[in-house]
Amino acid sequence: MDGYGGSILEQWPRILWAIESSPFPHKVIIDAGAGFGKAAVLLYEYLNVKPDAIHAIDANEAARCHSMTPYPYRSTVRVDIRSPHTRWEMADTVLMADVIEHLPWADGMQLLKSIPGQIVVSTPVHALQASNEGVPKLEQHVSEWTLLDFNATGRLERHWLWTGGVESQAQHIVLLRPLAAGRGPG
């Protein structure tokens, strides 16, 4: 690993659990910030209820060249997730694994409030402590998120704090319910 552009592998069982245990469907998933394609492989391999399709979007050309193959994604698009042309409505689930901290806070909040389907987010608790020196612009951490921020979306369904035994690597893992869904369990 080059120090950026990836997520902590040990958090993935909790991310998969967030999707699998959700009371909302995950038949069609958009992997926002798909990177090298790790999420799609893990989703297809480990979810008990397999998605019908996973679509990838990523603004980073360097990462795209590795994940933009016919398998495991149904389609792939190179686009900034803030683009008004992103077709979020095509999916019932959007996965943002270690993505939201790369957006300015206001842009991220607007995005979380506008995507129609459920959203599963993972983000470092201490994202701004990461060094941005020498890191490409798209990979820099520019915002930090708290449980209160996710609650402010009006969509918080569940929250887990994953520490993996190392406080410096603590991650929020969050399930945000779909816009049309009422208040769900817990």
Image (cartoon, helix red, strand yellow):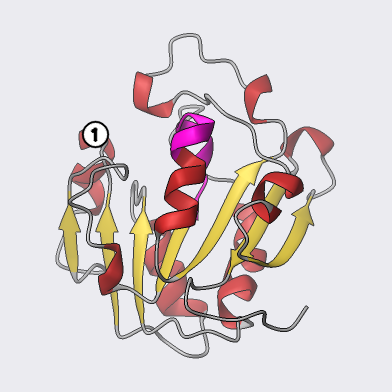
Residue at x 42%, y 49% (from the top left corner): 111
Q: Residue furthest bottom?
A: 49
Residue 38 seen: yes
Q: Does residue 6 appear left or right of residue 84 in this picture?
A: right
In this orientation, which residue lies closer to the viewer: 129 or 5?
A: 129
Res. 6 in view: no
Camera-side residue of 2 and 94? 94
Q: Please check the rendered image and state whether residue 135 is part of the magenta-colored stretch, yes or no.
A: no
Vertical placement of residue 168 versus 150, above or below: above
**Residue 161: where, in percent of width, then height?**
78, 54
SS for dot 1: helix
Q: Residue at x 43, y 10 (%)?
A: 134
Q: In the depicted view, which residue is nearer to us: 148 or 72?
A: 148
Which picture quadrant has residue 95? bottom left
The number of callouts visible is 1
Identity of the residue drawn at 34% across and 56% down = 37
Q: Which residue is mark 1?
A: 62
Q: Position of residue 7 (x, y in %)?
A: 53, 45
* Rendering quarter of residue 52: bottom left
Give whichever of 173, 156 is nearer the camera: 156
- Amino acid tagged 1: Ala
Q: Name above or below for residue 16 compared with residue 34.
A: below
Whether residue 100 appears in magenta in the rendering, the answer is yes
Q: Position of residue 185 (x, y in %)?
A: 73, 83
State whether residue 47 is above or below residue 32. Answer: below
Q: Residues within 10 Å of mark 1 (few under 14, many from 20)?
A: few
Q: Is residue 65 left or right of residue 110?
A: left
Residue 186, image x and y in percent? 78, 78
Vertically, is 185 above or below 33?
Answer: below
Range shown magenta:
96-107
